[in-house]
Amino acid sequence: MPQSIVRHEHVHLYAAEPQTEAGRDLSNAILELRHAEQVQADRSQRISGLGGIDLSALRYLVQARRETREVSPKDLIVMLGTSSATVTNVIERLVGKGYVMRQQHPTDRRAHYLVPTDAATALVDEVYGGHHGAVVSVIDQLDEDELVVTAKVIRRIAQTLDELATRS
């Protein structure tokens, strides 16, 4: 019995259900998507062999590299919303695994940037490529009207959730 609660918890809505059958179907679809995203996040950690915060840090560093932006440890503290002690440990683990190199700041001897290695980029691509590729494959099968309506609905929901987050 306890495992059946865990297996079905993701479809439980902690609010009044939408008023129409179509609304309930959309609500269930959103809950299913949320669950699938969580399963993919767990899968990403398992494939990478990294903890959640380490994988997030690595993903941010790879993204910054692709945008030709430099990231310092202080930047990573802000990005991860954590302490300098935690980020120091994350950096040490990633350096130790060969995923991050420290690059000296060009004008400040005391400062350095964090640069992901090619192995880090390959790992991030491997971990997220299948997930993102699957999403794009479904999107590419939708017609223009479906794309417009879906994007509008998702944005409205995201905006409402963002507003809720800023109120608390």
Image (cartoon, rainbow, N blue to C red):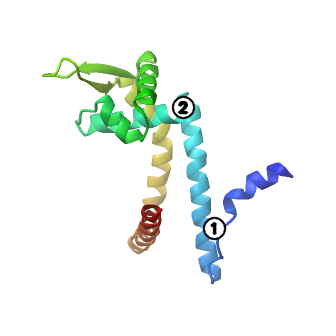
Which residue in the protein does label 2 denote? 51
State the residue in front, 9 or 140. 9
Q: Is residue 95 above or below residue 83?
A: above
Residue 11, quarter of the rendered image: bottom right
Q: Are marks 2 and 1 in contact (CB under 8 Å)?
A: no
- 3D distance between C-alphas at marks 2 and 1: 30 Å
Give the residue type that dot 1 points to. Answer: Asn
Q: Is residue 61 left or right of residue 130?
A: left
Residue in view at x 30 percent, y 26 percent:
115
Question: Among all residues in the image, which is located at the extreme bottom?
Answer: 20
Crowd band around label 1 with a 10 angstrom C-alpha radius: few (<14), some (14–19), many (20+):
some
Query: Label 1's element?
Result: helix
Q: Residue furthest left?
A: 107
Q: Residue at x 45, y 23 (%)?
A: 89
Task: Find residue 144 and report its image quarter.
Answer: bottom left
Residue 95 appears at what percent x and percent y? 40, 19
Secondary structure beneath label 2: loop
According to the picture, the residue beneath numbered tag 1 turns out to be 28
Q: Is residue 62 visible?
A: no
The amino acid type of the residue labelled 2 equals Gly
- From the image, state whether disc 2 or disc 1 is nearer to you: 2
Relative to 81, is 23 on the left or the right?
A: right
Name the side, left or right, on which 21 lies relative to 138.
right
Taking depth in this image into account, of 126 and 158 the one nearest to the observer is 158
3 relative position to 110: left or right: right
Residue found 62% across the figure and 60% down from its top: 32
Chain-order first, disc 2 or disc 1: 1
